[in-house]
Image: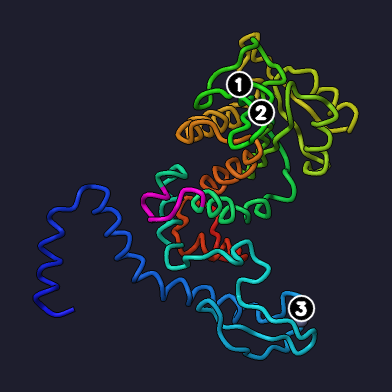
Amino acid sequence: MNNGEFMQLISNLRDLDHHQRKRLSATLNQVGDEAKVFDLIESCIEANSACPHCASPDLHRFGCAGGLQRYRCQQCRKTFNALTGTPLARLRDKPKWLSYLAAMKQSLTVRQAAVDTGIHRNTSFRWRHRFLSWISQDRPPELKGITEADETYLLESGKGKRNLGRAPRKRGGSATKRGISDEQICVLVARDRAGQTLDFVMGNGALTKARLTSALKPKLAADALLVSDANPTYTAFCDAEGFSHETVNLSQGQRVNGAYHVQIVNAYHSRFKQWLARFHGVATHYLPNYLGWRRAFEQHPQMEPEILLNVALGNFQYLTVT
Ligand SMILES: [Zn+2]
């Protein structure tokens, strides 16, 4: 571009509307991000340097495809690149990944993130869930010591499904039945006093002992002390499995029982619901991703786009726990 054309381009910028300005700014950022993203992806394979098919370290370079170095394994003869076997394999538009992750850091909706990044909203949706797939691996293996647990309920949402079996609710909507019914999804949150948190989507309707057992039993240390409200399901679970148990009778106005309460988990529920409201009702199928996203937010609040990309590529050593 010669100088005259460039000056013309600059003067044309004055006529941009708000959205065009955002798009331009995103495009300029992406030009700078392109090299960064490819470097980051390639550095993964240097760090791991093993075949994703057979784990052999005997690799040869084998040309380039899609801007990425290809490798061939000398053992199994299969070819691959740094993204093979990761949730990000075959996603396109790599130069836009960092600005997309910046939009995720701001908890933008699928639609807003699409506009900010300059991608289609279906792409935005697909990327969101691919970039979140790591969170199912970032769960503490075991809760220890005093552990609060409490359930909360969210309205079931078949958003995006073709056959709902009922008239769709507009933007989340409200339940038609009073109290806890099959229209609601039970979400259990458990947190120990070291701040380790686990969330579980427990299915439709009220909490049952069988579901509680399958969720919590493998995740509670043998010497854990479970604190819950007076819901007898928790008592039945602890009696059957031999866990120590303390309760607070919230319905009778008892908020604290000595050192025991469920206020930390209750506060977590309300922060989660408040944050979730911006998404206008997420499909129940994707609820675990949103729970995990929120959990990641709380555990790693300083997660910059580059870090998030590293983590999405499986490099968990970039996570700092606060
Ligand atoms: Zn191999």
Which residue is depicted at the point 74% across and 51% down?
A: 141
Residue 271 percent across, percent down from the top left = 50, 32
Which residues fall within the magenta stretch? 113-122
Amino acid found under the numbered disc labelled 3: Ala
Closest to the camera, between mark 3 and mark 1, is: 1
Closest to the camera, between mark 2 and mark 3, is: 2
- Structural distance between the alpha carbons of marks 3 and 1: 50 Å
Given residues 37 and 207, the one toward you in this image is 37
Q: Hey, which residue is sitting farthest right in the picture? A: 240
Secondary structure state at the residue bearing disc 1? loop
- Structural distance between the alpha carbons of marks 1 and 2: 7 Å
Considering only order in the chain, which callout, 1 or 3, is on the residue closer to the N terminus? Answer: 3
Residue 161 percent across, percent down from the top left = 63, 36
In the image, residue 121 lies in the stretch drawn in magenta: yes
Ligand 1 within 8 Å of disc 3? The answer is: yes
Amino acid found under the numbered disc labelled 2: Leu
Given residues 167 and 309, the one toward you in this image is 167
Q: Quadrant of residue 181?
A: top right
Name the dominant secondary structure of the magenta segment: helix
Which residue is depicted at the point 58% across and 27% down?
A: 266
- Taking the image as shown, residue 163 lies to the left or right of residue 15, namely right
- Write down the residue under mark 3: 55
Given residues 295 and 117, the one toward you in this image is 117
- Write down the residue under mark 1: 167
